[in-house]
Amino acid sequence: MTTRHMTLRVNGAEYDVAAAPDTLLLDALRYTCGLTGAKLGCGTGDCGACTVTVDGEAVNSCLVYVLECEGHPVETVEGVTASGIGAVVAEEFVKADAVQCGFCSPGIIMSTCALLARTEPGAVTDEDIKEALAGNLCRCTGYVPILDAVRRASGARR
Ligand code: FES
Ligand code: FES
Protein backbone atom coordinates (compact mmCIF):
# COMPACT_ATOMS: atom_id res chain seq x y z
CA MET A 1 0.00 0.00 0.00
CA THR A 2 1.37 3.43 -0.90
CA THR A 3 2.66 5.54 1.95
CA ARG A 4 3.24 9.25 2.02
CA HIS A 5 4.98 11.47 4.52
CA MET A 6 2.84 13.81 6.55
CA THR A 7 3.38 16.12 9.50
CA LEU A 8 1.53 15.16 12.65
CA ARG A 9 1.37 17.77 15.39
CA VAL A 10 1.21 16.20 18.84
CA ASN A 11 1.46 18.04 22.15
CA GLY A 12 2.86 21.05 20.31
CA ALA A 13 5.66 19.10 18.56
CA GLU A 14 5.81 18.09 14.90
CA TYR A 15 6.47 14.51 13.81
CA ASP A 16 7.20 13.19 10.33
CA VAL A 17 4.96 10.18 9.80
CA ALA A 18 5.13 7.75 6.86
CA ALA A 19 1.44 7.00 6.58
CA ALA A 20 -0.41 4.43 4.53
CA PRO A 21 -4.11 5.05 3.91
CA ASP A 22 -4.93 2.55 6.68
CA THR A 23 -2.37 3.71 9.27
CA LEU A 24 -4.21 4.36 12.50
CA LEU A 25 -3.57 7.42 14.63
CA LEU A 26 -3.00 5.10 17.62
CA ASP A 27 -0.22 3.22 15.80
CA ALA A 28 1.43 6.43 14.58
CA LEU A 29 1.43 7.82 18.11
CA ARG A 30 2.83 4.67 19.68
CA TYR A 31 5.29 3.44 17.04
CA THR A 32 6.37 6.59 15.16
CA CYS A 33 6.08 9.27 17.83
CA GLY A 34 7.06 6.98 20.72
CA LEU A 35 4.08 8.20 22.75
CA THR A 36 2.77 5.05 24.43
CA GLY A 37 0.29 6.63 26.84
CA ALA A 38 -2.70 5.86 24.60
CA LYS A 39 -3.30 2.11 24.83
CA LEU A 40 -4.68 -0.53 22.51
CA GLY A 41 -7.50 -2.23 24.35
CA CYS A 42 -10.33 -3.46 22.14
CA GLY A 43 -9.36 -1.87 18.83
CA THR A 44 -13.05 -1.50 18.03
CA GLY A 45 -14.06 1.76 19.71
CA ASP A 46 -15.58 0.15 22.79
CA CYS A 47 -13.10 0.65 25.67
CA GLY A 48 -11.67 4.17 25.38
CA ALA A 49 -8.13 3.13 26.36
CA CYS A 50 -6.83 4.77 23.15
CA THR A 51 -8.56 8.15 23.73
CA VAL A 52 -6.67 11.28 22.73
CA THR A 53 -7.96 14.67 21.66
CA VAL A 54 -7.95 15.98 18.09
CA ASP A 55 -8.82 19.67 17.79
CA GLY A 56 -9.77 19.45 21.47
CA GLU A 57 -12.37 16.71 20.94
CA ALA A 58 -11.94 13.29 22.55
CA VAL A 59 -11.59 10.56 19.90
CA ASN A 60 -10.81 6.87 19.86
CA SER A 61 -7.43 6.84 18.13
CA CYS A 62 -7.93 3.17 17.19
CA LEU A 63 -10.70 4.30 14.84
CA VAL A 64 -9.05 7.34 13.24
CA TYR A 65 -6.67 7.22 10.26
CA VAL A 66 -3.60 9.33 10.89
CA LEU A 67 -3.92 10.98 7.48
CA GLU A 68 -7.19 12.52 8.69
CA CYS A 69 -5.20 14.34 11.38
CA GLU A 70 -2.99 16.40 9.10
CA GLY A 71 -3.49 20.00 10.16
CA HIS A 72 -5.45 18.97 13.25
CA PRO A 73 -3.50 19.19 16.53
CA VAL A 74 -3.46 16.06 18.66
CA GLU A 75 -3.01 16.01 22.42
CA THR A 76 -2.09 12.91 24.39
CA VAL A 77 -1.67 12.20 28.06
CA GLU A 78 2.08 12.82 27.75
CA GLY A 79 1.35 16.51 27.17
CA VAL A 80 -1.45 16.84 29.67
CA THR A 81 0.36 18.82 32.35
CA ALA A 82 1.36 21.49 29.81
CA SER A 83 -2.16 22.96 29.98
CA GLY A 84 -3.77 24.48 33.03
CA ILE A 85 -6.78 22.17 32.80
CA GLY A 86 -4.65 19.09 32.26
CA ALA A 87 -2.40 19.85 35.21
CA VAL A 88 -5.42 20.19 37.49
CA VAL A 89 -6.96 16.98 36.16
CA ALA A 90 -3.75 14.98 36.66
CA GLU A 91 -3.36 16.32 40.19
CA GLU A 92 -6.96 15.53 41.17
CA PHE A 93 -6.76 11.99 39.73
CA VAL A 94 -3.78 11.33 41.99
CA LYS A 95 -5.39 12.96 45.04
CA ALA A 96 -8.65 11.01 44.54
CA ASP A 97 -6.78 7.70 44.13
CA ALA A 98 -8.51 7.33 40.76
CA VAL A 99 -5.63 5.38 39.17
CA GLN A 100 -5.08 1.73 39.99
CA CYS A 101 -3.52 -0.40 37.21
CA GLY A 102 -3.53 2.74 35.05
CA PHE A 103 -4.47 1.08 31.75
CA CYS A 104 -7.61 3.17 31.35
CA SER A 105 -6.21 6.32 32.93
CA PRO A 106 -4.66 8.09 29.90
CA GLY A 107 -7.93 7.78 27.99
CA ILE A 108 -10.09 8.83 30.91
CA ILE A 109 -7.86 11.80 31.61
CA MET A 110 -8.06 12.95 27.98
CA SER A 111 -11.86 12.57 27.93
CA THR A 112 -11.96 14.59 31.15
CA CYS A 113 -9.77 17.33 29.69
CA ALA A 114 -12.06 17.59 26.65
CA LEU A 115 -15.11 17.83 28.93
CA LEU A 116 -13.63 20.52 31.17
CA ALA A 117 -12.36 22.53 28.19
CA ARG A 118 -15.92 22.92 26.89
CA THR A 119 -17.53 23.58 30.29
CA GLU A 120 -17.47 26.60 32.57
CA PRO A 121 -15.29 26.10 35.66
CA GLY A 122 -17.28 24.44 38.45
CA ALA A 123 -20.30 23.86 36.20
CA VAL A 124 -19.83 20.17 35.40
CA THR A 125 -22.71 17.98 36.57
CA ASP A 126 -22.58 14.27 37.35
CA GLU A 127 -24.64 13.67 34.22
CA ASP A 128 -22.07 15.57 32.15
CA ILE A 129 -19.29 13.43 33.61
CA LYS A 130 -21.12 10.15 33.02
CA GLU A 131 -21.91 11.14 29.45
CA ALA A 132 -18.33 12.27 28.73
CA LEU A 133 -16.83 9.09 30.20
CA ALA A 134 -19.45 6.67 28.86
CA GLY A 135 -16.96 5.34 26.31
CA ASN A 136 -14.13 4.81 28.80
CA LEU A 137 -14.12 1.48 30.61
CA CYS A 138 -12.25 0.84 33.87
CA ARG A 139 -11.87 -2.67 35.27
CA CYS A 140 -10.32 -1.62 38.58
CA THR A 141 -11.76 1.40 40.32
CA GLY A 142 -15.53 1.00 40.22
CA TYR A 143 -15.62 4.56 38.84
CA VAL A 144 -16.39 6.24 42.19
CA PRO A 145 -12.91 7.76 42.64
CA ILE A 146 -12.84 8.71 38.95
CA LEU A 147 -16.11 10.63 39.27
CA ASP A 148 -14.76 12.23 42.41
CA ALA A 149 -11.56 13.28 40.63
CA VAL A 150 -13.48 14.89 37.75
CA ARG A 151 -15.80 16.74 40.16
CA ARG A 152 -12.80 17.99 42.09
CA ALA A 153 -10.96 19.02 38.94
CA SER A 154 -14.00 20.99 37.80
CA GLY A 155 -14.31 22.63 41.20
CA ALA A 156 -10.61 23.40 41.39
CA ARG A 157 -10.99 25.59 38.30
CA ARG A 158 -13.52 27.92 39.95
S1 FES B 1 -8.66 0.51 21.88
FE1 FES B 1 -9.75 2.15 20.99
S2 FES B 1 -11.69 2.12 21.95
FE2 FES B 1 -10.67 0.34 22.73
S1 FES C 1 -7.37 1.69 36.73
FE1 FES C 1 -7.21 -0.34 35.89
S2 FES C 1 -8.58 -0.33 34.22
FE2 FES C 1 -8.92 1.55 35.19
Image (cartoon, rainbow, N blue to C red):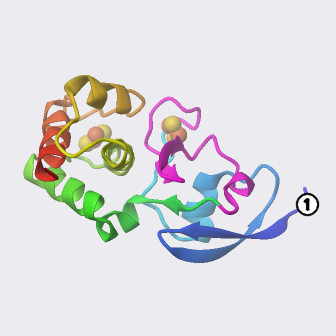
Q: Looking at the image, which is closer to me, 118 or 131?
A: 118
Residue stretch in magenta: 42-71
Q: Position of residue 88 (x, y in %)?
A: 19, 58
Q: Residue furthest left?
A: 95
- Asked if residue 16 is positioned above or below residue 46 in the image, the reply reads below
Q: Residue furthest top?
A: 127
Q: Quadrant of residue 1?
A: bottom right
Q: Residue at x 91, y 60 (%)?
A: 2
Q: Residue at x 44, y 38 (%)?
A: 48
User: What amino acid is found at the position of numbered circle 1 in the picture?
Assistant: Thr
Q: Secondary structure at mark 1?
A: loop
How many marks are shown on the rendered structure?
A: 1
Q: Position of residue 109 (x, y in %)?
A: 32, 49
Q: Residue 108: say if magenta.
A: no
Q: Residue at x 27, y 57 (%)?
A: 85
Q: Quadrant of residue 145?
A: top left
Q: Which residue is mark 1?
A: 2
Can residue 98 be seen? no
Q: Give the prevailing secondary structure in the magenta stretch.
A: loop
Q: Position of residue 96 (x, y in %)?
A: 9, 46
